[in-house]
């Protein structure tokens, strides 16, 4: 019975890892590609660590597997956030070129940092959304 | 495909294919940030491969390797992103 749970966890975890790498290869934009490594690879690794903890039923292994799971779930999204922030500061373009930039002027290292408060409205008008042009 | 070892060995082949797809993005990526994100995904695939090898050999000696490789991959991504942004004194 525990081997069955470990086998199912291995299959689903490896499927998530393959979906993460497939998304990394096929998604059209940089800001879409970091979603793949953040969510799918983290979840696949968590399932693989669960499979390891159930397959080798040993107390130090369970403790270290939980520790590795907590560490990966804490650091992979933080790494993706820092990547996205650095890419936004270096003007990596998003894919639809007419996408509304709601953060224009808010980044302290951006080129248009002197326009803080000019581009983003304080209160959006009712019926409109800053994410939808026009 | 009854035992856990056969499933783990087939999963190891699948993780190798996933790592090859990340390498294709490293080769192809138009900006350096694409290569960096694919490197992060490659490190996570490598951690998955170490976990599967540890299951295949019925040993618990590689769980420390998992922790250290994940930590080093994260720190490498952070430092490279800081350098590419320009906020690292280099």
Image (cartoon, rainbow, N blue to C red):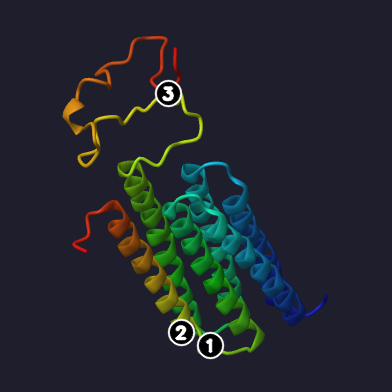
| Residue A123 against residue B28 in the figure, above or below | above
Q: Mark on residue A60?
A: 2
Task: Check disc 2: other Cα within 10 Å, few if <14, some if 14-19, many if 20+.
Answer: few
Residue that appears at 60% across and 60% down: B24
Can residue A115 be seen in the rendering of this structure? yes
Which chain is indicated by disc 2?
A
Residue marked by disc 3: A131
Q: Nearer the viewer, mark 2 or mark 1?
A: 1
The location of residue B44, given as percent across then percent down, is 51, 67
Q: Quadrant of residue B67?
A: bottom left
Q: CA distance from mark 2 to mark 3?
A: 49 Å
| Residue A125 against residue A23 in the figure, above or below | above
Residue marked by disc 1: B60
Seen as rendered, the residue at the extreme right is B1
Helix, strand or loop at mark 1: loop
Helix, strand or loop at mark 3: loop
Seen as rendered, the residue at the extreme left is A114
Residue that appears at 58% across and 82% down: A57
Q: CA distance from mark 2 to mark 1?
A: 8 Å
Q: CA distance from mark 3 to mark 1?
A: 50 Å
Task: Check disc 1: other Cα within 10 Å, few if <14, some if 14-19, many if 20+.
Answer: some
Q: Quadrant of the N terminus of chain B?
A: bottom right
Q: Mark on residue B26?
A: none
CB within 8 Å, label 2 to label 1: yes
Which chain is indicated by disc 1?
B
Left or right: B85 as drawn, with respect to A131: left
Which chain is indicated by disc 3?
A
The location of residue B50, given as percent across then percent down, is 56, 79
Residue that appears at 56% across and 55% down: B28
Q: Earlier in the sequence, mark 2 or mark 3?
A: 2
Can residue A1 be seen in the rendering of this structure? no
| Residue B87 against residue B74 in the figure, above or below | above
């Amino acid at each position: 019975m525990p081997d069955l749970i470990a086998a199912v966890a291995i299959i689903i975890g490896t499927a998530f890892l393959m979906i993460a790498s497939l998304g990394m290869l096929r998604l059209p934009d940089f800001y879409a590609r970091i979603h793949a490594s953040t969510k799918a690879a983290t979840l696949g690794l968590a399932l693989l660590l669960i499979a390891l903890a159930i397959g080798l039923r040993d107390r130090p292994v369970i403790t270290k597997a939980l520790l590795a799971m907590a560490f990966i779930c804490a650091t992979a999204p933080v790494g993706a956030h820092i990547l996205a922030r650095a890419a936004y500061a270096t003007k990596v373009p998003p894919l639809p070129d007419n996408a509304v930039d709601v953060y224009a002027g808010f980044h302290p290292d951006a080129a248009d940092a002197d326009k803080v408060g000019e581009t983003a409205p304080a209160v959006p008008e009712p019926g409109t959304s800053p994410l939808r042009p026009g | 495909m009854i035992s856990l070892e056969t499933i783990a060995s087939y999963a190891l082949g699948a993780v190798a294919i996933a790592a090859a797809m990340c390498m294709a993005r490293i080769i192809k990526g138009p900006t350096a940030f694409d290569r960096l994100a694919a490197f992060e995904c490659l490190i996570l695939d490598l951690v998955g491969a170490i976990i599967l090898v540890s299951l295949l050999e019925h040993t618990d000696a590689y769980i420390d390797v998992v922790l250290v490789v994940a930590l080093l991959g994260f720190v490498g991504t952070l430092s490279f992103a800081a350098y590419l942004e320009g906020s690292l004194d280099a």
